[in-house]
């Protein structure tokens, strides 16, 4: 079949990370094409997540505190984090690296690196909004709830680190938290303390990715949907991308390829002999229509003990209808198969309200919880994946970083 013009860069994956990468590549003057197997942007991990842009959550899972969670993660189906072990040696290698990364010295280094990227990403998102003329995440402020003195102390330490980095938070008592978020009055009385991050944001990541794709398409980015990548091959200083497009074989060529397929990145790169330590962590969410929204939060609220997030991210202009979203931040690492027990435990209350099963997404998590942004070792082949539960939080910053790398290598 005849080949089209060689693109400067082909981005594989149209989630929030892939679309952001395309935007920043175009800003750098590169001709970009985005390839995705679904029929529109952000139909997988970015589709129905908790909707937070949470710099205050930019702390690795792999921390010294993880050791006390090991037994519940393996054996308790209602634990806030679960691990389903199997015989795959790749999973065991991932888990061993994860535990090694949880040692105090390694954690401190990675925590600073992750926080710096999160703040850089918030700044990059501001630049995108000014350029495109729309508010990516209109909600402002995330409130973290703490049930115990130990958890409140840990978050005061996190708050000190955030303050040193220029991202202040506020430590609140129960009464102060209730004044800030009156909807807490409808909950139980176990609240010990809270932390408020006024600079954090919340919104609809799926809607943002769609608007960003539309805006970047108007600025020259080409989008190729319903196109599943089957293989990659280097050819004459460029890359040939083999696809199934509408059930028919298709190809395109690009001088650079960015793999931004989330959990799908590792299987594709394995065909080229590249081992990428990305494991899927299941997350669950359910979006609840409530006709009278007086009891729904105004802020995005995170229950730290249960790793639950609720974001009032959609409210109709008329009729007072609210659609808050309840999400669980991470469960059942290590399997692509949905864990119905974990999903039911995480969102049972919300399921009783509205019926139906929760949405399940797979977050691509690296052992050290830092995204893989940069070259793969093969000329012209790049990676932007492994953002875990911080996909939207880190998307703009990691995309801008990678776009500058692409421009420098051009």
Image (cartoon, grey):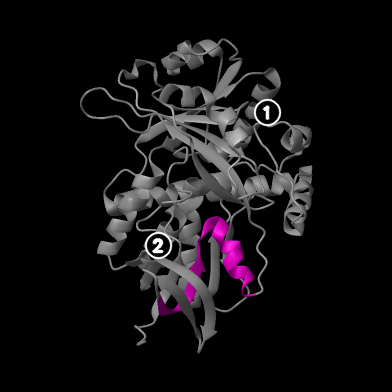
For residue 139, what is the image quadrant? top left
Residue 38 percent location from the top left of the image: 40, 58
Q: Which residue in the rendered view is the most extreme toward the bottom? A: 236
Q: On the rendered image, what quadrant is the N terminus found in?
A: bottom left
Mark 1 vs 2, N-terminal side: 2
Label 1 belongs to which residue?
A: 154
- Does the magenta segment cover residue 253? yes
Residue 279 lies left or right of residue 6; in this view the side is: right
Magenta-tinted stretch: 249-272
Q: Residue at x 50, y 39 (%)?
A: 54
Work out whether residue 404 can be spotted. Answer: yes
Label 2 belongs to which residue?
A: 24
Residue 235 percent location from the top left of the image: 51, 87
Number of marks: 2
Residue 5, numbered circle? none
How busy is the neighbourhood of tag 2: few (under 14 within 10 Å), some, or many (20 plus)?
Answer: many
Where disc 1 sits, the SS reads helix
Residue 297 lies left or right of residue 57; in this view the side is: left
The residue nearer to you, when weighing 236 against 40, is 40
How busy is the neighbourhood of tag 1: few (under 14 within 10 Å), some, or many (20 plus)?
Answer: few
Where disc 2 sits, the SS reads helix
267 w.r.t. 389: above or below: below
Residue 10 percent location from the top left of the image: 43, 71
Residue 253 lies left or right of residue 111; in this view the side is: left
Q: Residue at x 52, y 75 (%)?
A: 231
């Amino acid at each position: 079949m005849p080949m089209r013009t060689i693109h400067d860069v082909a981005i594989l994956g149209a989630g929030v990370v892939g679309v952001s990468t395309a935007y920043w590549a175009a800003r750098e003057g590169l001709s970009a094409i985005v390839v995705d197997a679904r029929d529109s942007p952000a139909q997988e991990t970015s589709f129905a997540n908790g909707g937070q842009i949470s710099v205050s959550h930019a702390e690795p899972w792999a921390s010294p505190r993880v050791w006390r969670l090991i037994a519940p993660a393996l054996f308790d189906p209602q634990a806030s984090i679960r691990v389903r072990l199997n015989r795959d040696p790749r999973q065991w290698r991932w888990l061993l690296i994860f535990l090694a990364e949880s040692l105090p010295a390694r954690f401190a280094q990675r925590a600073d690196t992750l926080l710096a990227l999160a703040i850089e990403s918030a700044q990059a998102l501001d630049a995108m909004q000014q350029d495109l003329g729309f508010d990516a995440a209109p909600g402002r402020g995330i409130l973290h709830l703490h049930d115990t003195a130990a958890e409140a102390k840990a978050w005061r330490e996190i708050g000190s680190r955030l303050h040193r980095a220029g991202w202040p938070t506020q430590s609140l008592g129960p009464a102060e938290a209730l004044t800030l978020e009156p909807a807490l009055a409808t909950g139980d009385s176990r609240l010990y303390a809270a932390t408020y991050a006024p600079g954090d944001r919340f919104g609809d990541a799926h809607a943002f990715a769609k608007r960003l794709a539309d805006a970047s398409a108007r600025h020259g980015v080409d989008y190729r949907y319903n196109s599943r990548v089957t293989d990659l091959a280097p050819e004459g200083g460029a890359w040939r991308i083999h696809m199934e497009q509408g059930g028919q074989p298709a190809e395109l060529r690009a001088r650079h390829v960015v793999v931004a397929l989330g959990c799908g990145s590792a299987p594709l790169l394995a065909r080229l002999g590249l081992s990428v330590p990305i494991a899927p962590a299941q997350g669950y969410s359910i979006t609840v229509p409530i006709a009278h929204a007086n009891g729904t939060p105004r802020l995005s609220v995170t229950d730290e003990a249960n790793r639950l997030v609720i974001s009032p991210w959609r409210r109709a202009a008329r009729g007072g209808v609210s659609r808050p979203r309840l999400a669980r931040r991470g469960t059942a690492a290590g399997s692509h198969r949905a864990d119905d027990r974990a999903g039911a435990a995480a969102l049972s209350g919300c399921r009783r309200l509205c019926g139906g099963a929760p949405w399940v997404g797979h977050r691509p998590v690296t052992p050290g919880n830092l995204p893989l942004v940069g070259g793969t070792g093969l000329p012209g082949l790049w990676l932007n994946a492994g953002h875990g539960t911080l996909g939207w939080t880190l998307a703009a910053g990691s995309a801008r970083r990678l776009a500058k790398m692409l421009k420098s290598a051009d």
